């Protein structure tokens, strides 16, 4: 019989959420990204990311105590991004983590500003943000061997929003849940809510 004074051990990460801010594709963009994933997989092998997981990470918050969720949301609330278009036109491979990805040969200023603004807010709110230079990319393959870089069909991705995502670790991969969305509005554009 279980000892009643001995509480059940809590999972090590209980009370935290694994969070990141990301760009999440619309259906047409997701299909185009996924086609590139299939193409790249034929060349480089590895494990393809499921279509419904494809995204670009803007800022990685990592294990976040549940009671800091409001602070994370406030960071995103404070950022006013503008809509833009990202042209993903080149495949890339990182040897250190064996990831195959699709990236942009040119980063639009609105993208760089969005990444910088979000990370600045998070830093000011004492979130331990990643200080490595940001490379906009969609991970398409994991555990891939890489190889000669094949020509890819460029994906034109219209950015209209960014999202807060919860990453749930499962036995063989992560599952992502979009928790909140923020619209990227043109200056002066009304995006809903109370006027006045
Ligand atoms: P797993 O780690 O379980 O293999 P995953 O890498 O897809 O799965 P997470 O580790 O939760 O899931 O990462 C979520 C997103 O954040 C991914 O796009 C990942 O590349 C990115 N990411 C993870 N760690 C960092 C980090 N230290 N700095 C920046 N981005 C990160
Ligand atoms: Mg990871």
Image: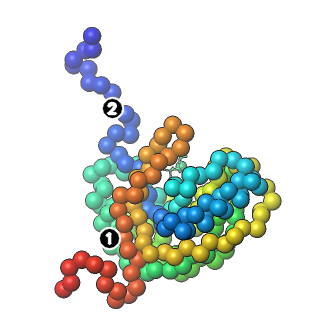
> Tag 1: Cα neighbours inside 10 Å, few (<14), some, or many (≥20)?
few
Q: What is the x, y in percent for residue 7?
A: 26, 24
- Asked if the residue at label 2 sits under 8 Å from ligand 1, the reply is no
Q: Quadrant of the C terminus?
A: bottom left
Residue at screen point 25% across, 14% down: 3
Instruction: Identify the residue at the far top of this view.
Output: 1
Query: Is residue 137 toward the left or the right of residue 130 in the image?
Result: right
Way the structure is coloured: rainbow
Q: Residues within 10 Å of mark 2 (few under 14, many from 20)?
A: few
Question: In the rendered structure, are the residues bearing label 2 and label 1 in contact, judged by CB atoms less than 8 Å apart?
Answer: no
Dot 2 or dot 1: first in sequence order is: 2
* Tag of residue 151: none
Instruction: Report the residue marked by disc 2.
Output: 10
Q: Position of residue 50 (x, y in %)?
A: 56, 52
Read off the residue under disc 1: 77
Vertical position of residue 115 compared to residue 45: above or below: below
Which quarter of the picture shows residue 33? bottom right
Q: Quadrant of residue 188?
A: bottom left
**Residue in front for this viewpoint, 147 or 14:** 147
Q: Tell me the residue at 61%/66% (across/down).
A: 32
Q: Residue at x 24, y 77 (%)?
A: 193
Q: How far separated are the C-alphas under marks 2 and 1?
A: 33 Å
**Secondary structure found at label 2:** loop
Across and down, in percent, residue 75 comes to 34, 67
For residue 135, above or below residue 46 = below
Vertical order, 11 against 61 (above or below)? above
Dot 1: element = helix
With 52 as the anchor, is 192 left or right in this view? Answer: left
Q: Is residue 51 visible?
A: yes
């Amino acid at each position: 019989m279980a000892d009643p004074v001995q509480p059940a051990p809590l999972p090590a990460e209980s009370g935290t959420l694994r969070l990141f801010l990301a760009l999440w594709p619309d259906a047409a963009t997701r299909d185009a990204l996924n086609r590139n994933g299939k193409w790249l997989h034929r060349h480089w092998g590895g494990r393809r990311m499921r279509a419904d997981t494809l995204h670009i990470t803007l800022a990685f918050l990592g294990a976040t105590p549940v009671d800091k969720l409001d602070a994370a949301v406030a960071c995103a609330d404070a950022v006013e991004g503008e809509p833009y278009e990202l042209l993903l036109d080149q495949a890339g491979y990182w040897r250190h983590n064996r990831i195959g990805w699709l990236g942009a040969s040119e980063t639009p200023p609105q993208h760089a500003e969005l990444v910088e603004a979000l990370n600045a807010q998070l830093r000011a709110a004492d979130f331990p943000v990643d200080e490595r230079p940001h490379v906009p990319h969609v991970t398409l393959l994991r555990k891939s061997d890489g190889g000669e870089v094949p020509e890819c069909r460029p994906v034109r991705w219209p950015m209209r929003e960014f999202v807060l995502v919860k990453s749930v670790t499962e036995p063989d991969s992560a599952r992502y849940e979009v928790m909140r969305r923020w619209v990227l509005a043109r200056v002066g554009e009304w995006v809903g809510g109370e006027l006045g």
